[in-house]
Amino acid sequence: MKILITGAGGYIGSNTAKVFLQAGYSVVALDNFSNGFKAPLELLQKEFGQEKLVIYTDDLVDDGGASVMDREPDIQGIVHFAALLNVGESMQIPEKYFTNNVIGTQKLLHAAIDHHIPYFLFSSSCTVYGEIDNPPVDESFPVKDASSAYGATKQLCESMLHWYDKLGKIKYISLRYFNVCGASDDSTLGDAKRETFGLMQNAVKGALGMREFDFNYQKVNTPDGSPIRDFINVVDLADAHVKGLEYVMKNDTSEVFNLGTGTGNSVLEIVNEIKRVLGVDFPVKDAQNRRTGEIPQIYADYSKAKRLLEWEPKRSLEQSIKTLAQFYKDHPHGWE
Ligand SMILES: NC(=O)c1ccc[n+]([C@@H]2O[C@H](COP(=O)([O-])OP(=O)(O)OC[C@H]3O[C@@H](n4cnc5c(N)ncnc54)[C@H](O)[C@@H]3O)[C@@H](O)[C@H]2O)c1
């Protein structure tokens, strides 16, 4: 079966392409390579063959991938990662985010409908829940006012998906990720963004001496005063996409799922775990400008994904730290 993966040259897209290829799918990889890279996809072509993975450079804002769909007529489903995700930048230049993420998704949806591709998987985020005060969060929690323009783009895309489903145009799965971390099990595919945002990514780089790491969170009401988040391994996350696509194809019904571990770890716990696993005591400074509006704690109730997708996260924090550290050691300058 052939699927289209948008944003396939990115961190989660490349890891998910690998898992789909391992499951026997053919993958059409689409990316404008604004933030992603051809190198991880070429690596996958070497491993699985060029006929199983075809790479297209295309910008969804131009034609929603229609020209790629014209050339690849038998695509059965779309896994849509392509987006910009720098929360800070989205507050400085919101128009860039609304154009890229919302218009890009709208055009992709239209191209998919025109090409009779009925199944759609969307990369959403726990940011859609806004501020919550009693985790774990399940999917019945209300979608609240987003705390960033980036978060608002995810809400708007989910809203479009809801409407296209209601109008009988597509069936979709929206996957609301918590904090994604780690690298592929063999450490060949990791988070190579030029500027990484994730706590684990930046703290591992700090531990390896690749950048300064400082605490930029606002003190919050948790036992150690640092925010609590849910860290999900990227391969576990990728596995859920295969199960999600198979679910929507089999049941022909749309659903929303949280993807997390069900466990919260504080920023301080993560930093201490990185120090323990990598055996280094790296310096951590206090950032000059601390973030504001920090949600004290958020972690997932993933029991719906467990029940309907038969999915469960399997990889430990230790494994995520080790695979990510190895990826950064092997690629100190990313993919370039
Ligand atoms: N990384 C996380 O912790 C996290 C958490 C929640 C949700 N998400 C969502 O997961 C998805 C993937 O995130 P990631 O961490 O892999 O990011 P990434 O930046 O590594 O990958 C995104 C990819 O999309 C491509 N892209 C962006 N705009 C495009 C466009 N208009 N046309 C074609 N390609 C385009 C980029 O070049 C890049 O390769 C995003 O939708 C993001 O919002 C990520």
Image (cartoon, rainbow, N blue to C red):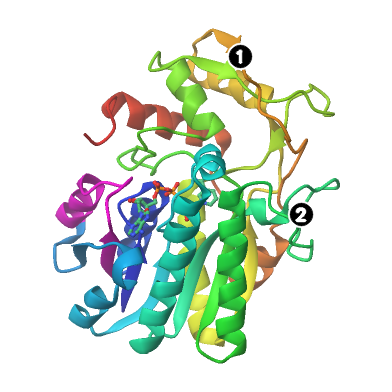
The picture quadrant where one finds residue 16 is bottom left
Whether 40 is among the magenta residues is yes
In-image side of 295 versus 258 (left or right): right
Answer left or right for 42 relative to 69: left
Closest to the observer: 177 or 242?
177
Left or right side of 165 for 100: left
User: Please, what secondary structure does the residue beneath circle 1 have?
Assistant: loop
Whether residue 312 is visible to the viewer of this picture, yes or no, is no
Residue 235 appears in view: yes
Residue tagged 2: 137
Residue in the image at 39% along x and 39% along y: 191
At label 1, the amino acid type is Gln
Res 72 quadrant in image: bottom left
Residue 318 vs residue 220, the one in the foreground = 220
In this figure, which residue is indicated by the disc labeled 1?
A: 288
312 or 190, which lies in front?
190
Quick one: quadrant of the N terminus?
bottom left
State the mark number for residue 220: none
Question: Pointer 1: residues within 10 angstroms few (<14), some, or many (20+)?
Answer: few
Q: Can you give x and y, in whole percent of width and height, for residue 66 in the image? A: 28, 77
Q: Position of residue 209 (x, y in %)?
A: 40, 13
Residue 273 within the segment the image draws in magenta:
no
Q: Is residue 315 above or below residue 79?
A: above
Q: Residue at x 38, y 17 (%)?
A: 210
Q: Which residues are magenta?
A: 25-47
